[in-house]
């Protein structure tokens, strides 16, 4: 069925604040932010009954830093604090997201 539904784009705080050794990732997340803004204006222009949002996730514990090619001489790592990210499917087939801290570090 057309003209209804929800689109959830997964972004990152690194779309707004870049960090060393992760330029490609930060650039990709900035592109998702720009794409979401453009898509939103098209949805409004066409008066569609489609909802759009972007979820900016924190640093998530993924194997990305274990398998990604890196020729920089230093291993890239996520910016602390790092969180476990769990996706569960509901009975209706929609996703339920859960973010839990992996380790708590005191803030200075």
Image (cartoon, rainbow, N blue to C red):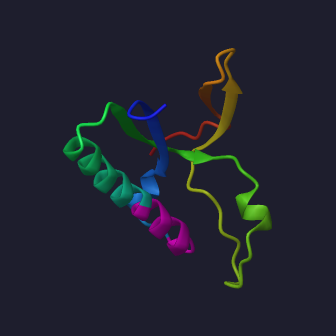
Q: Is residue 101 visible?
A: yes
Residue 86 place in picture, x, y as percent: 68, 32
Q: Which residue is at the front of the view, 103 or 5?
A: 5
Q: Residue at x 52, y 45 (%)?
A: 58
Asked if residue 16 can be seen in this view, the reply is: no
Residue drawn at x 32%, y 30% as measured from the top left: 49
Q: Nearer the viewer, residue 21 or 41?
A: 41
Residue sitting farthest toward the left = 45
Q: Position of residue 12 (x, y in %)?
A: 47, 51
Please indicate whether residue 47 sits to the left or right of residue 27 in the image. Answer: left
Seen at 29% across and 36% down, the residue is 48
Q: Is residue 28 magenta?
A: yes
In the rendered image, residue 67 lying in the magenta stretch gets the answer no
- Give above or below for 101 relative to 70: above
Q: Which residues are magenta?
A: 20-31
Quadrant where the C terminus sits is top left
Q: Residue furthest front?
A: 1
Q: In this image, 45 relative to 3: left or right?
A: left
Please identify the quarter of the rendering in which residue 77 is found. Answer: bottom right
The total of numbered circles placed on residues is 0
* Residue 103 sits above or below residue 23 on the image: above
Most frequent secondary structure within the magenta stretch = helix
Residue 31, image x, y percentages: 41, 64
Front in this rendered view, residue 23 or 45: 45
| Residue at 79% from the left image edge and 66% from the top image edge | 67
Is residue 53 positioned above or below 5 on the image?
A: below
Above or below for 101 versus 96: below
**Residue sticking out furthest to the top:** 91
Apparent side of residue 8 relative to residue 44 in the rendered image (left or right): right
């Amino acid at each position: 069925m057309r003209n209804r539904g929800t689109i959830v784009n997964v972004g990152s705080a690194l779309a707004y604040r870049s960090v060393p050794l992760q330029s490609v990732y930060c650039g990709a997340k900035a592109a998702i932010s720009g794409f979401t803004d453009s898509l939103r204006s098209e949805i409004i222009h066409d008066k569609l009954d489609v909802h759009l949002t972007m979820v900016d996730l924190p640093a998530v514990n993924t194997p990305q830093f274990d398998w990604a090619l890196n020729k920089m001489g230093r291993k890239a790592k996520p910016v602390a604090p790092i969180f476990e990210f769990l996706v569960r499917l509901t009975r209706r087939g929609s996703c339920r997201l859960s973010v839990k801290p992996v380790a708590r570090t005191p803030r200075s």
